[in-house]
Structures are given as C-alpha cells and as structure tokens.
Amino acid sequence: MRYVKPENLKDASALIGGEEGISRILAGGTDVLVQLKAEMVEPDLIVDVKHLDGMREIVAEDGGYRIGAAVSGAELGEHTGVKALWPGVVEAMELIGSTQVQGRATMVGNLCNGSPAADSVPAMVAADAVARIHGLAGERDIPVLDIPTGPGRTSLAKGDIITSVFLPARPDHASDAYLRFIPRTEMDIAVASAGVSLELDADGTCRAARVALGAVAPTVVLVEAAGAALVGTKLDDAAIAAMVQAAEATCNPISDKRGTVEYRTKTAGVLAKRATLIAYARAGGQK
Amino acid sequence: MPLDQNSKRDFKVIGKRVLRPDGIDKVTGKAMYGADMTAPGMLVGRILRSPHAHARIVSIDTSAAEALKGVKAIVINADLANPEDEFFADIRDNCLAREKVLYDGHAVAAVAAVDKATAKSALRLIKVKYEVLPHVTDVDEAMKADAPVVQEGRADESAPAGSSQNVTSHFEFGHGDLDAGFAKADKIIERSFKTAATHQGYIEPHACLASLGSDGRGELWCCTQGQYNVRTICSEVCGIEASQLRVTASEIGGGFGGKTTCFIEPVALALSRKSGKPVKLVMTREEVFRATGPTVSSSTDVKIGMTSNGRITAAQAKLRYQGGAFPCGTVEFGAQAAFAAYDLEAVQTLGWNVMTNRPKEAAYRAPGAPMAIFAVESVVDELCQELGLDPLETRLKNAARKGTLSSYGPTFNDIGLVATLEAAKAHPHYTAPLGENQGRGLSCGFWFNFGGNTCVSLNINPDGTVGVVEGNPDIGGSRASISMMAAEELGIPYEKVRTVITDTNSLGFNDVTDGSRVTFAVGLATIKAARAAIDNMCERVANIWGIDRDAVEWVDGAAQPAGPNAGSHPPMSLAEIAAVADQTGGPIAGHHEVNADGAGVSFGVHLCDTEVDPETGATKILRYTVFQDAGRAVHPDYVEGQMQGGSVQGIGWALNEEYIYGDDGRLQNAGFLDYRVPVASDLPPIETVILEIPNPGHPYGVRGVGETSIVPPLAAIANAVSRAAGVRMTELPISPPKLLKAMSERG
C-alpha cells in the first residue's frame, strides 16, 4: 500500500487516474480508515488531498458559500455564515459520528462514500448543492444529486476528485432542515432521513420546496412531487398530508437489520413532515 | 463469619468516598491491559473462523499456510489435550472446533506468524472443507422434535423423554398447590415472553500473551476475571500441571461475567508450545461478538393469579433458555430467581436448557435472572393494571421478608426487599406527574450472591505501611474496598494500605471474580487476615511489656494496655511495632483462607419513566431511580456505579441490544454500530438510593452489589413503555419498529 501526498490537484488526479489497483482519496479519513481497519478494503494507493489549496476553506461566493472538500463537520458547525444561510445542511453534517469524528469528517467524503444513508447528502440535495470536480480533463460542476448512483457507487470517473461543494445564495424567507431517525441518540446510521428546503413569499405561502429522502432507496432521492405538494400552500394539513403521501410513494427501501420496508417508509414520511415544519418556522412561516 | 456484635460502630474508613487507587493509571493510559504486554521474539496469533452456522469439518489442509515464509505454527483441535471432564472438553472444543463447527464464528484453526500481515495471509491459505448441515438458532425451534441436532448425546437424565436432543437439562422448583391457588384468584393472566441474546459489551476485547517453553513451564498474561480459573482451564485443555503455568491477570476493561471462561488462552499456549516463541493473541471486536459469550436468549410463559385486593394466590413460570452450541445450566438460576421477591403459598417454576447453533453462552451479570424477572414482573404489572391496583402497594403486599419460604427452597434471613420498596414509595419519583405518551414502570429484582474460595495475605511493612495481596481481578473497585476494610480493621489511614492482585503462583487458589463475591468474600478474608496480624502484634507488644497477651488490646491502630492488671504503658502504634519487628520475631503478616458462605441475597427496586413517540416508536428514558440493599456500602461511589452500570446495561437490553441472525444462521451485527449499547446521550442521570440492611454473614454487613442492578431494568422499562404506549410489550428488545407495529395494531 502506497501513501502519497501530491503537491497539486493535477498530480492528485493523475495519480489516481493512473493507478491500476484499488485507490482511495484521503480527506477526513473517517470512512477510509475505518474500512482499512475492518479489513473491508486493502487499497494499493492512498492519495492525501486535505493539504491542497482551498481544501480546508469556506469561501463566500455569489451570495452563497463554497465549502472545501476537507472542511470538517466541526469547522462547518462553527461557521456562522453557513449556519445562518443553510442551517439544515450544517445540522445534517453535524449529526455524523461522534465529537471526535466531527473533527475530521467531511461533507464531500460523506458524499463520495456513496451510502444512501449518508446524513449530509439529503440536506445537500434539498439545498440543490453543486459539487466541483477536478478530473483528468480539468474542472467541472455537477449537482450533488447526480453524484451517487447506488450503494457505495458514484458517477465519478477515474481521476475525479471533488474539491468543493457550493451552497447557493438564498432569498429572504427561505430556510432548510434535516432530520434522521436512529434507534439511539447519536453515533448511528440513519434508518430513514429527510432534508427539506423551502422558499416562502412574505405572507408565508410556499414558493419553492425541495424534499430529499435518505436510506429509503439505493440512492438519496429528490421527491419532486413532495415539494410540489407544498408549493402554493401555507402548509395546511392537506398539503402536508399530500407531501407525506408523495414521500412515502417514492420510498423503495430494503428490509434489513436496521429497519423493515414498512417501518422505513412510514418513518421517512414522518421525518419529511417534521423537517418541513422546522424549515417553515426557520423561514419565518407562521402556523 | 458472622456480623460483628458491634456492627453499629462508627466506621472511620468504611462508607467514605476515598480516591480510587487505579484512577491515575487508567486516565493517563499507563494501566496495562491484556494487549499491552510484549515479549522478545513475540509472534502474532490469529484465528480462522467458521463462515457456517453448522457444518461437519471434512478436512483441514494447512500445508500451504505452513509453507508461507514467516509462519511459525498452526494449531487445530488435535493439538490440544484430552480432558476427561466434559466441562473442560467443551471449552476446548469451543476454543478450536472438533469434528463440527457449531456456530458462525466458531474457531477452526489458529496461526502464529512473525507479523499481522503474514498471519492474515496464512489464514487465507488454510483450506477447510465443510459439509454444511441444517442449523437452528431459535430456542423454541430448537426444542421441536425434528429440529437439527446441534450435538448428539449431550442431554442429562433430567431432560424430558421424547424431546429434541437439543434439550440438555430440566429444572423444577416450587411448593404448594397450584390448582387450589389459581382457583382462589379473581384474575388470572397468562402470557408468553421472549428476550434476545445480549452481549456483555465490555470495552476491552479478549487479549493474552502466552509463553510455553520446551521445559514445560508456562507464563500467561491475560485479561480475565480469574487467573486461577484460567490456569485450571488451560492446564486441562493444554495438558500442563497447574504449578507449571503461572497466570497473571492484566488490568481489565470490563467483564460482566463474560471473562469467567477462556476463548483464546489455550490456543495461544498451544501456538507458543509449537513455535517455541511467545505468542500474542488479541481478538477483534467482530470476533468478540461472534465467538465470545453472549447471554442466553429466552422464551417464557408466566401465569399468575391474584385476588381483587392484590394478593397473589398462585404463580407459575415455564422458562426455555438457549445457551448456544454447548450444554449450559443457566435456566436453573432463572427458575430460582423468577419469583424470589414474593411470599407465595403456591408457586412452580420449570426450566429447560437448550442448545442452538450460536456461540457458547458465557455468564452475564446475574446470569439467567433478568429475563425471568422481566416475564414475571410484566404479568404482575398487567394484573395491577387490570385490577386497578397500585403496583408498589401490590408488591409490598406480596413481598418476601425474613422467614419467607422462598420460591426456590431456602427460608430467607434478614433481607432488604420491604425496606427497598418502602424507600421507593417514599421517593418523590414515584408520585411525580407524567405527561402525554409517558408511562412509569416498576420492577423488583433479586440476586443470590456468592462467597467462595478466597485467600488473602496481609503484610505489615517495616515502615508501618501495609500491603494486601489478593487473587481476584478488580472489575468493580475491589482494590479500594479491600484497602478500606484493611485500614478500618487495623485502625490506620486508607492511604497507608496498598492492595495488589497477584499471580497464580504467589497466593493460594481463589475462585473467579463472579457472583458479586469479591467485596464480600475477599473483604471478609482481609478483615480476618488483619485480625490475625493484630493478634500477632499484640502478642509481641505483650512480650515487650512483659504482660499477658490478654492484657493487650488493639485500639485506633495501636496496642494498648487493657484491664486493671496490665500496668501503665504508652500505646505502641502499628508503625512503632513494625519498626522493631526484626527484634520481636521477624516480619509480621496475617493471612486467611476460607470457602466463604453467608454471602446474603440482595434485592433492588427500579423505577423508570419513559416517553414513546407514537409516530416513530422511539422510546426515551426520562427518569430512572435505583433502590438497592447494599448491606454495607464500603465505598458508596462504587456501589452507586454498580447500580447505575447495571441499569444502563438493562436499558440497552430492553430497548435495542440483540443478536440478529439471518436465515443463513450468520450473525448480522457483529459490531457496536448495529449492536446498540446505550450511548451517554441516550440516558438520563441514573439516580441511586442505597439501603443498608446489614448482611448477617459478614463482619461489617457487606452484601455483593454488582449483579442485582441488571435484574429489574428489563421489566421496569417494559412496564413503563407498555403503560406509555397502551399496549403490552412482551418481546425484547422493544426496538422502534416493534413498538410502532404494536401501537398501530392496538388501533
């Protein structure tokens, strides 16, 4: 196993792109090192990227924020600007692991791990976040929604490195929220989860809504019908019920040791409802 | 050894919250645990485990692995000895499978190599040919006549005729006329219950360093609850005389009963013998889950009759426990403990021990009792609901007390159950208001406690300090408590005493640290050893003063003249006596050897408030209070710690912890991610109320406190959740999907 700390992104991409064996990119390492220790994987090459330019930075950009791929959950949680603009994304990231893990874990790592239960991903999808990728052919931007393709799999090509995630600007009366269900209170993996982002008119009418669910399908899913059920309403009971119904209808989970199909489906709807109400209150909506 | 006549004396050290002697080493990382010992030339051991729940081993080909550079030894079952006793043969066959693998994770072969990577590669090169057999992991399934048989011919004469060979033994306890009792009842409730197997969950995985030379002399350093027990097992399983194997216990990162047997030590010794090098063997967490002792899983039927004013007229429990792939005896404890808290005219408990294709059960804190009491206390609670009775008053009305003929035979002496119930009744928790979706649960709990073989030496050092040498690993603060009892008895400050846990060649035999026995039995032996040393010191002082031994008494850490004819002499302190010991007969020591009885049973009452989320089935523990009789709390911090720790393990057992097996018989959650012990944020502060009803069998009145605390939580929580959710929960764990389903079916 080789460990390499390249001097720039170009070299990093080339190293990974040229590796014939198994390679892993190391930022926070909270997935990679655990997999190594559990003997789930024996990489031939580990490329460390956390020292590269911009990787540890949170930068204001076009009214939103660009978050480097090696920014830890703890750093994100202390950033008042991001917290004010996208509280749901920050709370999702902060739910991952323990206090110690938060010192290392990154949102981009969470995305690249490809788990349908990744906590930060539904929140990023609801936020319509965009990943910036450095590949063999240079730089490109791809919506976070399009990165995961199945459990443990992503649309990234060989040599691709996600360098940052961009959370866009928000109008007034907009906010988001994320909730997950776990059988205990921390250090666990979501049985079901929901990220919701809302934009309201000044009178509290929902103008735009994105509802994303985790752990109920092979990838995190954006439930467009659920968002649509809220638009044009002040989140009356009928609108919420329609949203929950749309969320449940989208669920395509598995039954496993963490939960049954029936339980995951029901819980995803409950979480979508609760997250919607929290986002609504944060956006200034009155119910 | 009876309670001292002056047991109401003012203790100077007992009852104080003194500093723990192991604290600094543990928080600074200096403490030496099982995996912390190294030896020159040490090899790394690793174990190959079965991927099948049940299979015949057709062949094991180790040739390719042996040929790998860096591999120094490979052992299989045939490299171990042939103990005559089935008890030891079972441990041997659990350490390395013989003829068949009996559960997922069962050890098949082990390798010692120069490093971890080589050992790992060697495991992959060992070729095992299996003939896969049908398996069974559920206790009720395993009892069926046509169930796959885990092991042939293992049932004893008590096993009922015509049942599956998996049923290995049967027990029955009780007294009185059940039919007449049930006929007198105004209400009878009969229900069936199930509990999942749970693991002790100790933080430290099993680890050892073994060295067994060509001269037949062995050294073993390991993490265990009993170094003498390890010596006995390893001697039998490896064919070594006890005197030739010195076993030293490391610091221990939790045991809870699970480290009262051996899983890897005989294997490490066999590897060392074969390679001629020291071998270190450390289990991974996955190995700990797959191959070390969870407790039994259970299936129980309980039937209780009650009059409308709350008197139990008859009670019956049928308990079926599976203890994994080897015969176990655990149901006997469950059957004895089930109704121990009650004074009953007619009671019967029936128990069956059953084998399944699961890991060999190991002791877990009050083995067998929590699941039995869960079933009994659930039915008592439901009777109270149905009859509109107060659950605490009802338990007081039926409570066992001094003179009660217990459900398992003995007549109780001084016991603390009524006092404990009264304390719960008087506590503000019992009458605190509850909100929506909230419920309060209550349960009694009981444990026998144990004394056992114990050996202590107490040395008076020339500088006036004292060394206590004992032979039981400290898993609950026993070094502090033993130093305290020595200091109390000798009349010197606690800081002047140091207690060490010694190896098997430096002190006589001691039973394993189990049965909540150490503070009781080692404490008792320490007090006796101190009294022997005091007697010796008084004798010497009598000689110095030229008076009779009877004219010298020991007061406040010094010898002083006693009685009218003793004359006038200034007192001689322990330090002064120690300083001149070389002129009065040489070193001063006291020792005591005993097979202690009179441990004194222990009762506890737990009160728990829960809130359930009707939309997700999640349960939150809002408030939890433990009331327990400690006899005498030597070090209250440790007593409270035991009460809290047992409660927390019980909370995990009640709500989330379980061994999950797939249809393929393989364990699906061999890690702390999906085997969910509670984390700190899951828990409220666990309040504790210590009662002190002195144990008549100990000079200071001490009772063991380590195990009783895990007995009531299962029922206390299930009762609280059942009341909060409006539906009776009869299967543990009450995980969120299970509770949500029950609530939705309730309508």
Image (cartoon, coloured by chain):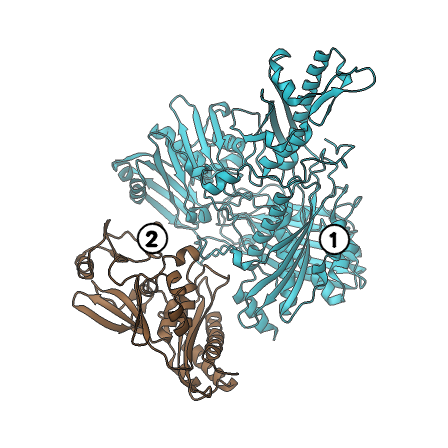
Q: Specify whether residue B162 is in view.
A: no
From the top left corner, tell me how far across and down residue B474 is, in percent. 55, 37
From the top left corner, tell me how far across and down residue A1 is, in percent. 24, 49
Drawn colour of chain A? brown
- Which amino acid is tagged 2? Leu
Looking at the image, residue B479 sits to the left or right of residue B336; the answer is left
For disc 1, the chain is: B
Residue linked to disc 1: B423
Decide which of B539, B330 is in the foreground and name it: B539
Is residue A33 placed above or below A220 in the rendered structure?
above
Name the image quarter holding residue A122: bottom left
Residue linked to disc 2: A33
Is residue B291 placed above or below B226 in the rendered structure?
below
From the top left corner, tell me how far across and down residue B660 is, in percent. 48, 57
Drawn colour of chain B? cyan
Q: What element carries label 2?
A: helix
Could you tell me how far apart the alpha carbons at marks 1 and 2 are, in whole angstroms? 51 Å
Decide which of B313, B342 is in the foreground and name it: B342
Residue drawn at x 65%, y 31% is: B487
Q: Give the crowd class for mark 2: few <14, some 14-19, many >=20 residues within 10 Å.
A: few
Q: In which quarter of the image is the C terminus of chain B?
A: bottom right
From the top left corner, tell me how far across and down residue B428 is, in percent. 72, 59
Looking at the image, residue A272 sits to the left or right of residue B332; the answer is left
- Which amino acid is tagged 1? Ala
Residue drawn at x 59%, y 41% is: B156
Q: Is mark 1 on a helix, strand or loop?
A: helix
Q: Specify whether residue A39 is in view.
A: yes
Q: Quadrant of the N terminus of chain B?
A: top right
